Amino acid sequence: MHHDHVNKRETPVGRWLPVLFYTANLFLWLLTGVAAGLTELAWLVILPLSALALYLARTKRRWA
Amino acid sequence: MTPNFSLLLASGIIFALPILAFICWRFGGPDALAFVVVSGAFSAIMDFISSFVAQNYAYPGQSPLWVFTFIFFGWIGVSGSCLFIAEGILARPGQDMLTQPRLWWQVPVATGVIAVLVDLFIDPIAVAIGYWVWVVEGNVYYGIPLLNFVGWFVLMFLAPLAWIAIARRRHWGYLKKGVASLAALIPLMTASILLSLALNGIVAAIGLR
């Protein structure tokens, strides 16, 4: 059965826009924190970045 | 640094709209509408109750309308961005969260976990700057109560769960998906209250706050 939403997921736009959305949010908060002098909290970004790393690894392996 | 609430609201809206456009592109308008209702409206209503009824936290000096608008768009953005990361981690090639059998519940669970990871980063920064203030004190993580993270998990688990259930009905149009989304609000609210009570009860039972 043809599923257009599945095909779209496996396009460059389908793979990379979620990365852009996710990192843009993290980057804005990181920037906000650093601008406020909260550099001691910056390392916490590795928590959500771990999910992004998993996403990149899983989608790369499957679609390579 | 003084919190800039206008910038916060603008960034929340700017963050949500492209995600809705992306959902519209991948799944179609009816599913974008369903996403607005179950991710935006449902989550915003429950979060609004947490702030103004339960008085767990507050956005200093902001009107109820400002708060509702911000959390409505904010939850759409968070839910959408975490949902697609979860799908990418779990879905096999040639499948997605609507076609792969067990992803109807696995993706929502992963979305909830990822959203909590995001908030473990965001909340300490936002609180330190003064974007929001916790009335309930926490004793584990930067003074932020664990009920906050329970709330993030519950909302970001239930909203995608409902959305996937509706989006899997591929032959439904705007009317059916709109009505189904609205009809899902009461069960979603009930489920979120019960699940939050259960999880917060477990957290309290082990002496954490």
Image (spheres, coloured by chain):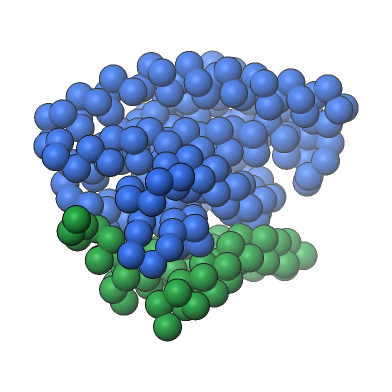
Chain colours: A green, B blue
Q: Residue A13: x percent and y percent?
A: 29, 72
Q: Which residue is drawn at 84% across and 36% down?
A: B139
Q: Residue at x 42, y 83 (%)?
A: A64
Q: In which quarter of the image is the C terminus of chain B?
A: top right
Q: Residue A24: x percent and y percent?
A: 45, 66
Above/below status of B169 relative to B198: below
Q: Residue B24: x percent and y percent?
A: 21, 53
Q: Residue B79: x percent and y percent?
A: 44, 46
Q: Residue at x 20, y 30 (%)?
A: B178
- Residue extending farthest front: A1
Left or right: B30 in relation to B55: left
Question: In terms of depth relative to the viewer, which is nearer, A51 or B41?
Answer: A51
Residue B179 visible within the image: yes
Above/below status of B202 relative to B153: above
Left or right: B108 in relation to A43: left
Q: Quadrant of the N terminus of chain B?
A: bottom right
- Residue extending farthest right: B207
Toward which corner of the image does residue A33 lie, by quadrant? bottom right
Residue B77 visible within the image: no
Question: In terms of depth relative to the viewer, which is nearer, B141 or B132?
Answer: B141
Above/below status of B155 relative to A19: above
Q: Residue at x 33, y 48 (%)?
A: B98
Toward which corner of the image does residue A48 lie, by quadrant? bottom right
Left or right: A59 in relation to A4: right
